Amino acid sequence: MVRVPARGQEMTFEVSRRSLLKGMVGAVAAAGLPHSTRAEGPVVKSDVFSVLVDIPRCIGCRACMRGCQRANDLDAPQDLMDMEHLESRLEPTHNLWTVVNREGVETRRHVKRQCMHCLEPACVSVCPVAALHQTEAGPVLYRESRCIGCRYCMVACPFDVPRFEWNNGLTPVIGKCQFCASQRLFKGLPPGCVEACPTGALKFGRRDEMLFEAKARVHARPDVYVPHVFGEEEVGGTSWLYISDVPFEKLGFKKNLPKRPLPSLTWDVVSWIPGIVAVLGSLFGLLAFNLSRKTHSPSAPKDEA
Amino acid sequence: MIGWLFLTAVAGVLGWLAVSYGLGRPPRHGLSWAAGATGALWAVTAVVLAIRFTRGMGVMTHMTDVNPWGIWVGFLQAGVALSGGGFVMAATVHIFHIKRFEPILRPVVLLAFLGYVFVALTLFIEVGRPYNLWHPLAMWQHHSIMFEVAWCVTLYLTVLAVEFSPAVLERLGYGRAVEALHRAAIPIVILGVILSTLHQSSMGTMFLIVPQKIHPLWSSTLLPVFFLVSSVAVGLCVTVVASFYAARIFGKTLDRWLLADLARAASMVLFLYAALRLVDVSARNAWGRFTDPGWLGGVFLLEVGGGALLPAFLLSRRAVRDRPRWTVAACLPVLAGVVLNRLTVSWLAMVPYTGPGYFPHWMEVSVSFALLTGVAVVFGVAVRTLPVYPAADSPSATILPVRG
Ligand code: SF4
Ligand code: SF4
């Protein structure tokens, strides 16, 4: 059975990441890191790897899905991705990390879905063992060997991305897009899906470049595009960006997403904990000590623990 | 279908026994009835667990990628809340030094310990890779509230075990060790109370990350406070109910005025809790969503009205508090209300977001049910074999008539 490739690749990944760092994001490594709500090393938002999805350019051929299966050695059934199956709706699974579906009957648009690689990922902030972690270059990666399978990441993800291996009794994994980080990005290659796309609906680059490109395209054709880059501000920004000629809500994109990064919601409370412990500890200590002196008399029955 | 019928039958038998014992009219062969029903439940659950650990959760639960947390998480949350009696009573006796509650401290601590055992066992079955459950202790990710929860469960379970250990040690005749524990009682209790405060509230903090997925009647930044306050209230009520049943089933004696005092405290905390909930919904202008969907409005009414306000009112009446049976009857809705609250926050309030795709598989319920009965049986065995309750001739053991 093909498993999530993170296992056994942590070493190679570390090495390639380091060499990549030298070339690409030296600035990040050198930067004095301010206190951050992020669970792992902070990313420089403009520098991270990014993909721009131009929805009107997508013809729904699902070549990107096949590219993903190949690049990541996943064993999801291949025939599901054939052209004839385009009428059937696909949902991502633990071994199907990206899907393309026709969204809305009358719009006839196709939308590729996968992990958005949030700049401030909720999944990373909730994972109790850092099985999900964010690399300095942006991609949010999963390490099977650490995971306890609590599925908090699935609950927390604002885009409902992580998937669980429900039919595995003892070694289920979480499956989600790894941005082809260790196999391709850190070796200077584009993600498998982008390479496979025949129409240029997917474009790979740095986030500031992709954001600029997105705005340029929207600006150049205001008659075509809706004036919104999905992912620019949602939940604090995502690495994957979308532009569309049909309002995003009609294509199944989440509305009402807070602009504020989600991890800060929990951190606001978690960061209080040491203070609470200190206050409660001294308060109870004082109380117990004083009251025990007041109430204690030789004839009183002994405390029991 | 057969599974549900089976569970209903087991629940029916046990419920009938509970009511008849509560009314002081135990049926003939009551205990063998209970043993039969429980045994059948355990046998079935053993098979269920075998399926869980061989073929995966997909075949024996209705959880999916859209509903990754099912009823186990809700019951786990409820188990934590219902164990709240332990830290409330420990604080009362050892921090505030209200010593007259000491006779019921041991059974309550035992109950809390067993409640946390229930939680830990549920967790062991619920997570995908239970053999990795020690990872949070070694691989720190202190931004995760789940990380804190893992630590709290582990530490607090240990503290509860230590708090209860004198009963075991006394029985085994290790007087010296008991003496030593007596001297360390206060620091241990303080540690336990702090851990509980953190853990109870962090069960609510877990849901702060998904404000957009939870129905506005429940999606509040005050969730940690609500979880903490309601656990205090339900902890007091559990203490009342458990003390009463222990007296009835095991023939232990009980001071009914202690029950009345507990009930009065519970009433005050419940009023506070209900007020907080109502003010919170008003402050967030969420009443407009009360009937959207209508059934969730109904759940809110049941939970806050039926589970908090009504019992708070009843328990504030002298007439109710003077009669142990009435007190227990007024405390039971609090237990149900808190269970409903935890199930709602972790499941029902997310249904408008996830869609109605999840309803527990009977096998999920049978696992929780089996763990619950298991814990109850261990409690019974401990009460029979260990000095959990004060000896009948001690001065604090009086008054409630013993029957059955
Ligand atoms: S989209 Fe979900 S899984 Fe992907 S980085 Fe964001 S929170 Fe994590
Ligand atoms: S399921 Fe695994 S990856 Fe997801 S939060 Fe839990 S430990 Fe982390």
Image (cartoon, rainbow, N blue to C red):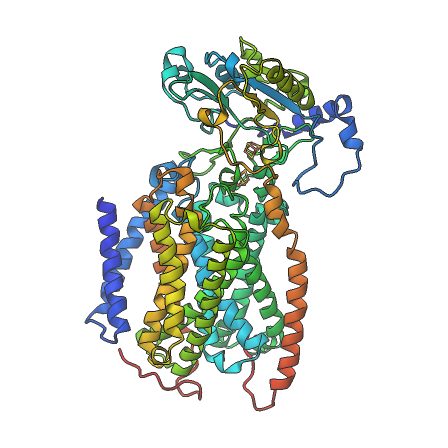
| Quarter in which the N terminus of chain B is drawn | top left
Residue A27 appears in which quarter of the rendering? top right
| Quarter in which the C terminus of chain B is drawn | bottom left
Residue B21 appears in which quarter of the rendering? bottom left
The answer to which of B98 and B382 lies nearer the viewer is B98
Give the number of callouts: 0
From where the camera sits, is residue A231 visible?
Answer: yes
From where the camera sits, is residue B388 visible?
Answer: no
> Is A71 above or below relative to B389?
above
- The x, y position of residue B388, in whole percent, is 44, 75
> Is B231 above or below relative to B396?
above
The answer to which of B196 and A218 lies nearer the viewer is A218
> Is B19 above or below relative to A224?
below
Left/right placement of residue B290 relative to residue A214 reads: left
- The x, y position of residue A109, in whole percent, is 45, 17
- The x, y position of residue B262, in whole percent, is 44, 75
Give the residue at the far top of this rendering: A198
Give the residue at the far left of this rendering: B28
Left/right placement of residue B25 relative to residue B334 reads: left
* Image point (23%, 73%), residue name: B26
Give the residue at the far bottom of this rendering: A299
Give the residue at the far front of this rendering: A223
The answer to which of B224 and A256 lies nearer the viewer is A256
> Is B220 above or below relative to B107?
above
